[in-house]
Image (cartoon, rainbow, N blue to C red):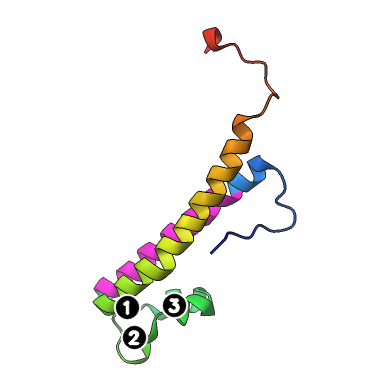
C-alpha cells in the first residue's frame, strides 16, 4: 500500500503536513473502533467512516460489539498497513527536506 497525495500536494513540506494529518485521522479512527470493541457500536460514529473501512468490520451485522478477532484483523491489516504507508511517505519527504539549502545554517550557531 502506498500513500496517494492529492494533486496540489507538491512540495516535501506539503507532503509532510499531509502525512501528519493522515496519521492523526488514522489515530482517531483506531481509537473510535477500539471504543466500539469495548463499548459497542455507536451508529452516529459508524455513519461517518468510509465504506471501505466498514467492509473490513463485518461483525456489526451480527453484534453491536466488535469481536477480538475483528479488532485484531483491523489493527494488523488496516491500521498497521496504512500507518506504514504514511511513515514511509513521510520519511521520503523528510529526507528530501534534509537536503535543502534554503537556509544558511552555521552549526556553531545552533
Q: Which residue is mark 1?
A: 70
Predominant SS along the magenta part: helix
Q: Range of the magenta residues?
A: 18-38
> Could you say where residue 31 lies in the image, as x and y percent from the top left?
36, 63
> Could you say where residue 89 lies in the image, as x and y percent from the top left?
56, 50
Q: Nearer the viewer, mark 2 or mark 1?
A: 1
| Residue found at x 53% / y 56% | 22
Choose top left, top right, bottom left or bottom right for residue 106: top right
| Residue found at x 67% / y 21% | 103
Q: Nearer the viewer, mark 1 or mark 3?
A: 1
In the drawing, what numbered circle is on residue 59?
2
Q: Which residue is mark 3?
A: 46
Name the foreground residue: 76 vs 50: 76
**Secondary structure found at label 3:** helix
Q: Residue furthest bottom?
A: 62
Q: Tell whether position 83 is magenta.
A: no
Compared to 61, does 33 lie above or below?
above
Compared to 62, does 106 lie above or below?
above
Query: Upstream in the sequence, badge 1 or badge 3?
Result: 3
Amino acid at each position: 500500500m502506498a500513500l496517494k497525495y492529492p494533486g496540489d500536494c507538491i512540495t516535501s513540506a506539503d507532503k509532510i503536513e499531509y502525512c501528519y494529518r493522515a496519521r492523526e485521522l488514522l489515530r482517531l479512527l483506531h481509537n473510535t473502533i477500539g471504543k466500539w470493541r469495548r463499548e459497542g457500536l455507536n451508529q452516529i460514529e459508524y455513519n461517518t467512516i468510509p465504506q471501505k473501512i466498514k467492509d473490513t468490520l463485518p461483525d456489526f451485522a451480527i453484534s453491536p460489539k466488535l469481536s477480538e478477532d475483528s479488532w485484531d484483523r483491523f489493527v494488523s491489516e488496516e491500521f498497521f498497513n496504512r500507518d506504514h504507508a504514511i511513515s514511509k511517505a513521510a520519511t521520503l519527504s523528510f529526507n528530501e527536506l534534509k537536503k535543502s539549502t534554503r537556509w544558511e545554517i552555521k552549526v556553531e550557531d545552533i
